[in-house]
Amino acid sequence: MKQVSDKETMTILQLAEDCLSSEGDFVELGCFEGDTSLLLAEVLKNNNSKKRLWIYDSFEGLPEKTENDFSELGRDFKKGELFTTKRFVKQRFLRANLPVPRIKKAWFSELKNDDLPEKIAFAFLDGDLYDSIRDSLNLVFPKLNENGKIVVHDYNNPQLPGVSKAVDEFLEKSDWNLKTTLSLAILSKRS
Ligand SMILES: C[S@@+](CC[C@H](N)C(=O)[O-])C[C@H]1O[C@@H](n2cnc3c(N)ncnc32)[C@H](O)[C@@H]1O
């Protein structure tokens, strides 16, 4: 099932294209079945970019919620929902004749610095829950290029209140700019 709306996808791809001239690779934390990953790979291919795409998921579905994620509206987002396999995602890239990205199966809390590229130009964070977004931001932030961008899905989604909490707490500790559109938070060093 589609997790990101068409309008959101168009915005994400445009922002990714804007980062093509920044040094660093593209990453997606929370790739699920790879819908957005495939399109990000297409952006790189269509622009003859040498950048690589790195994608991450538990491939065990969502982890347990914490108290930061509680919302009556979001009661369908349960542990183990959104399960898929790394093999399924890899096959989709092969079938689409796109370069297979680095696909890492791990909980974000277990990822080490070396599991991410040295420099990141564009990051799409789509882990749905407070801990997942907090951990993603902590991993990506130190590696992000000065002119790079982080896009967080579900920032304006009352079903998933942990996302905005994690982003807002992150922004309190940094001097980064926040712009929002649709359900997306767009974080950059410069406005
Ligand atoms: C909404 S889906 C992602 C949708 C995807 N970005 C797309 O464009 O179709 C959320 C994904 O995040 C993964 N996820 C959430 N929290 C995670 C965590 N802490 N560690 C690893 N994966 C996580 C889930 O397994 C799920 O596949």
Image: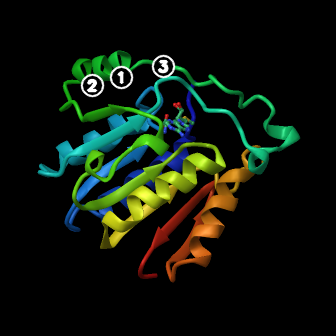
Task: Decide if residue 105 is in sight here.
Answer: yes
Question: Disc 1 or disc 2, which is closer to the eye?
Answer: 1
Q: Please, what is the three-letter code of the amino acid marked with disc 2?
A: Phe
> Which residue is denoted by mark 3 in the rendering?
84
Q: Residue at x 53, y 42 (%)?
A: 6
Q: Residue at x 22, y 60 (%)?
A: 24
Q: Please, what is the three-letter code of the amino acid marked with disc 3?
A: Thr
Q: Residue at x 71, y 31 (%)?
A: 77
Q: Is residue 39 above or below residue 166?
A: above
Q: Which mark is residue 93?
A: 2
Q: Please, what is the three-letter code of the amino acid marked with disc 1?
A: Val
In the shown orientation, is residue 45 left or right of residue 180? Answer: left
Q: Is residue 34 above or below residue 112?
A: above
SS for callout 3: loop
Q: Nearer the viewer, residue 81 or 157?
A: 81
Assess whether mark 2 and mark 1 are in contact (beta carbons under 8 angstroms). yes
Say whether disc 2 or disc 3 marks the residue closer to the N-terminus: 3
Q: Is residue 26 above or below residue 21?
A: above
Q: Is residue 14 above or below residue 37?
A: below
SS for callout 2: helix
> Which residue is denoted by mark 1 in the rendering?
89
Q: Can you give x and y, in whole percent of width and height, for residue 80 in the image?
A: 62, 22
In the shown orientation, is residue 125 left or right of residue 142? Answer: right
In the shown orientation, is residue 175 left or right of residue 142? Answer: right
Assess whether mark 3 and mark 1 are in contact (beta carbons under 8 angstroms). yes
Say whether disc 1 or disc 3 marks the residue closer to the N-terminus: 3
